[in-house]
Amino acid sequence: LTLIGFILAIVHVNDIEGKHFGGANAAHKIFGLLVVLAAISQPLNALIRPGKSDANRPRWNLFHWWIGRFGLLFAWIAVLFGTCRQQRRRRFLCCPCHFYCCCCFILHFQNYVIY
């Protein structure tokens, strides 16, 4: 589903704006690409996961954890850039969406800071 959504987004933008990763709001598009790459890498990482008793397992766990967190961070940034672009047309969308993203981001990471 991730790849299908990604392909549909590229096709849709190519039809409207031309080149997908350039032009208006390129930052949103690039961070969206990073989100898709992080999402695709997670199941692929499972294929190379070391066994529980392997000495490399803690390193793999950190790598897996950080890829997921960076994917979440990049998704948050992509949403912010995307809603800022829409702000020109629909001003009411920007503030509630940014507030929701900030709350989700803070609530997610507060578990790792406190515990």
Image (cartoon, helix red, strand yellow):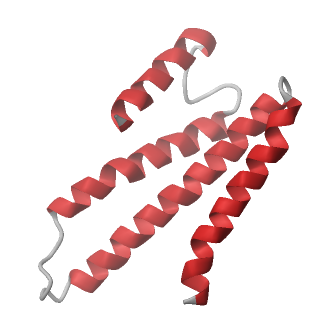
Identified at 56% across, 50% down, the residue is 75
Count how many numbered circles sit on residues in the image.
Answer: 0
Above or below residue 43? Residue 59 is below
Above or below residue 36? Residue 70 is below
Identified at 58% across, 36% down, the residue is 29
Q: Position of residue 63 (x, y in %)?
A: 35, 72
Identified at 41% across, 64% down, the residue is 67
Above or below residue 27? Residue 102 is below
Horizontal side of 66 relative to 106 (left or right) equals: left
Q: Quadrant of the C terminus?
A: bottom right
Seen from the viewer's position, the closer of residues 41 and 21 is: 41
Q: Position of residue 12 (x, y in %)?
A: 52, 16
Quadrant position of residue 87? top right
Above or below residue 79? Residue 19 is above
Q: Position of residue 91 (x, y in %)?
A: 88, 32
Q: Quadrant of the N terminus?
A: top left
Q: Position of residue 18 (x, y in %)?
A: 58, 14
Identified at 78% across, 38% down, the residue is 84
Horizontal side of 110 relative to 55 (left or right) equals: right
Seen from the viewer's position, the closer of residues 8 and 109 is: 109
Horizontal side of 14 relative to 23 (left or right) equals: left
